[in-house]
Image: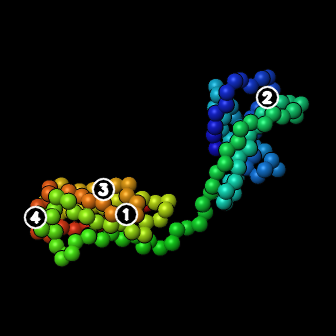
Amino acid sequence: MSGTYTGSLGAGESIQVSADGGANWVTASASAGTFSASGVTLSSGANALSVRTIDTAGNTTAGTGHNYTLDTVADTAPTASVTINDVDGYINNSEKAAVSYTVANVDGDATASVTFSSTGGGTPVVVNNLGNGTTTVDLSGLRGRRRSLRLAAS
């Protein structure tokens, strides 16, 4: 883990980091306002990192820590879906400039991308950074009668 500090360290002073409430401290390498500590073990769930300065006599000064949440639970099987919001199931020429669609069941910590393409050519239309909800897309640049879409979530 790494961070920044203001001011300068005195002779014999170092920065230490703890991820377990101060039970164990890891000495960081520090230079020019930045520090880096290897071997800090993060715990699952909502926790806090503590930072302090320590001198050779063992005197400490608390620094500003940072709260974090470590999610170690795997997401459930993907269930994300996309539905074209069209009554008859076909996108005709008068509809292709504003095609409404709904993305559903995207995990709260994920985003989805929808790619629209056509067997008749044209540049595929990619819409990124989608969450759950309804939006519209202009498919006028796709040629041909058969259009397809692909949903990817990450």
Around disc 3, counting alpha carbons within 10 Å, would you say few (fewer than 14), some (14 to 19), or many (20 or more)? Answer: some
Quadrant position of the C terminus in the picture? bottom left
Among all residues in the image, which is located at the extreme front?
A: 87
Which image quarter: residue 70?
bottom right
* Marks 2/4: CA–CA distance: 72 Å
Mark 3 or mark 4: which comes first in sequence? 4
Q: Identify the coloring.
A: rainbow
Which image quarter: residue 11?
top right
Type of amino acid at the residue the image marks with label 1: Gly
Residue beneath disc 2 = 13
Mark 1 or mark 3: which comes first in sequence? 3
Mark 2 or mark 1: which comes first in sequence? 2
Mark 2 or mark 3: which comes first in sequence? 2
Percent x, y for residue 71? Answer: 60, 60
Percent x, y for residue 51? Answer: 74, 40
Q: Is residue 12 above or below residue 18?
A: above
Residue 124: in sight, yes or no? no
For numbered disc 2, what is the local secondary structure? Answer: loop
Which image quarter: residue 130?
bottom left
| Image mark for residue 127 | 3
Q: Nearer the viewer, residue 11 or 62?
A: 62
Seen at 67% across and 27% down, the residue is 6
Percent x, y for residue 38? Answer: 67, 44
| Image mark for residue 93 | 4
Seen at 22% across and 71% down, the residue is 86
* Marks 2/1: CA–CA distance: 53 Å
